[in-house]
Image (cartoon, rainbow, N blue to C red):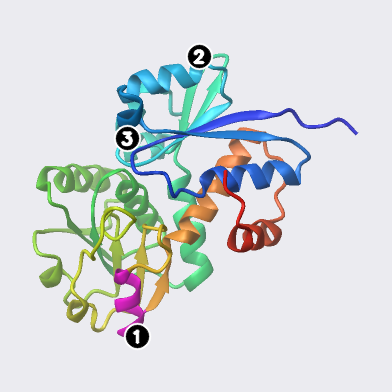
Amino acid sequence: MTMAPDYHLGLIGDNIAASRSPLLHVLAGRQNGMTVRYDRLVPPALGQSFDAVFDAAQAAGMRGVNVTYPYKEKAVSRVSVPDPLVRAMGAINTVLFTPGGPVGYNTDHSGFMAAYRGLRGDTPPGRVLMIGTGGVGRAVAFGLAALGAAELRLVDLDPAKAEALAADLRIAAPDLELRLETDPATAADGADGLVNCTPVGMVGYGGTPLAAPAMAGAEWVFDAVYTPTDTQFLADAGAAGAAVLSGWELFFWQGVHAFGLYSGGLPVDLAALRHALLTTDEVV
């Protein structure tokens, strides 16, 4: 049997010391009999710009890189994007370095949809409040539109970002009702789903983007943060009786989909990978 080639991958982002992405790809590669090297690349820590780190990764012969906060929108300008829907999103999280140049994908989008369906099946999202309209927010918003959300209420500390996302959504999903809001607690009133796509709650960014009393009546809640897995946002939602979808599920599915791109579609034993990620103490 011919062994699959070794891959050198990386993750470009800030505040990623606790990321489990390196382990996910190492374990997925191991299932296929290959060794994966996966580096954390933090531009501020390296004293370099995103572009310099991106160029160095390509020059080092890496198979590709994942891109996380706060560079998902910036990375679009560095790649070709074959999927018109992803071009409309204006954010990518997965880059494949090819002989023809870097190619960008968004497995946050496909990963969120897989995670949502795992929790709620074919039940549509309903009226959704989404806090945070940056890179991951864009992927999730387009995912919510594809899942049949009736209404999307957008809140961001930077109103211009929310307005830009709304403009793109009006073109891609003209039947989706959109509201631009400024106060999360007010916007949560009557919402079926509550979504956090800000870094608030992750390691290094404590707290929650929505006060617990505002969660009353919500049917489901999703937090894009996955380190830690159990955020205050999700704990408050669970206490309010909502079904909760952890950012860990998005992390898992976006990683599986990214590995498929890097490996050319090599198979992954999903149950075994999930179990290993949840139980191993291995540090990568």
Residue 240 counted in the magenta span:
yes
Of labels 1 and 3, earlier in sequence is: 3
Q: Helix, strand or loop at disc 3?
A: loop
Task: Check disc 2 and report the residue beneath it.
Answer: 59
Q: Main secondary structure of the magenta part?
A: helix
Magenta region includes residue 175: no
Residue 152 spot, x, y in % from top left: 24, 61
Query: Considering the image in quadrants, where does the C terminus appear?
Result: top right
Please determine whether, in this image, residue 48 is positioned above or below residue 70.
Answer: above
215 vs 272, left or right, is left
Q: Relative to residue 13, is residue 133 drawn left or right?
A: left
Amino acid carrying label 3: it is: Tyr
Whether residue 126 appears in this view of the structure is no
Tag 2: amino acid: Ala
* Helix, strand or loop under label 2: helix
Between the residue at mark 1 and the residue at mark 3, the CA separation in whole angstroms equals: 35 Å
